[in-house]
Amino acid sequence: MRKPTRKRLEEVLTKFIMFMLTSSLGTVVDLGLHWFLSARFFQDSYLWTLWIAPLISFELAVLTNFIIAYQFVWRERITRRSTRSFWRHFAAYNATSAGTFLIRLLLMQGIHFVFVSLGWLQGASYEPVLCNMLATCVTGTMNFYMSEFVIFKKVNKKKE
């Protein structure tokens, strides 16, 4: 395996910063919709506030994040722009996001049970969203890695 060059490290860092900045919109969609559903429709239901609401908000956030990534963050890496290309990339993006979502759900449950064990934030309407936000901090980095090195990987155009 070749050692990454300084230029490549700078490029990855730039992409990471762009990814984090643009993904903030998806995070706002995710957390805002999760809070709205949990506080307005799914009150007092563990299953709905900590499993179903995050699933709904997650899918809308994935679509938001993907459109931004496809159009702006990794635009130059998409050689052929077509409807087929869009959906093929979206399928891969959604699949990797679903994997990290499952990890996020498990992290959310763990954080929730720590809060319950410590008696923190019980009955607070924002507790499910706080669990979601903390878990999102961990899985966001995982999503970037999959986008940078798998979904929108840089193809070496030099013939070997």
Image: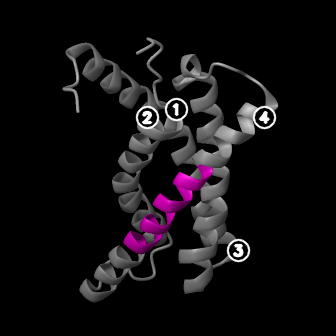
Task: Report the mark closest to the observer, 4 or 3.
Answer: 4
For residue 41, the mark is: 3
Q: Position of residue 88 (x, y in %)?
A: 70, 40
Rounded to the nearest whole Å, what is the CA distance between mark 1 and mark 4?
Answer: 15 Å
Element assignment for label 3: helix
* Residue type (three-letter) at the residue carrying disc 1: Phe
How far apart marks 2 and 3 lie (CA) works out to 37 Å
User: Which residue is denoted by mark 4 in the rendering?
Assistant: 84
Going by the numbered disc 3, the residue's amino acid type is Phe
Work out whether 115 lies above or below 155: below
Q: Residues within 10 Å of mark 2 (few under 14, many from 20)?
A: some
- The residue at which mark 1 appears reads as 152
The mark lying in front, picked from 3 and 1, is 1
Residue 3: percent from the left, percent from the top?
19, 26
Nearer to us of marks 2 and 3 is: 2
Nearest to N terminus: mark 2 or mark 3: 3
Which quarter of the figure is the N terminus placed in? top left
Asked if the residue at tag 1 contacts the one at tag 2, i.e. Cβ–Cβ closer than 8 Å, the answer is yes
Left or right of 92 on screen, residue 131? left
Q: Is residue 121 visible?
A: no
Q: Residue at x 47, y 40 (%)?
A: 150
Categorize mark 1 by other alpha carbons within 10 Å: few (<14), some (14-19), many (20+). many
Who's the residue at 52% across and 32% down the image? Answer: 152
Q: Nearer the viewer, residue 147 or 122?
A: 147
Q: Which residues are magenta?
A: 94-108
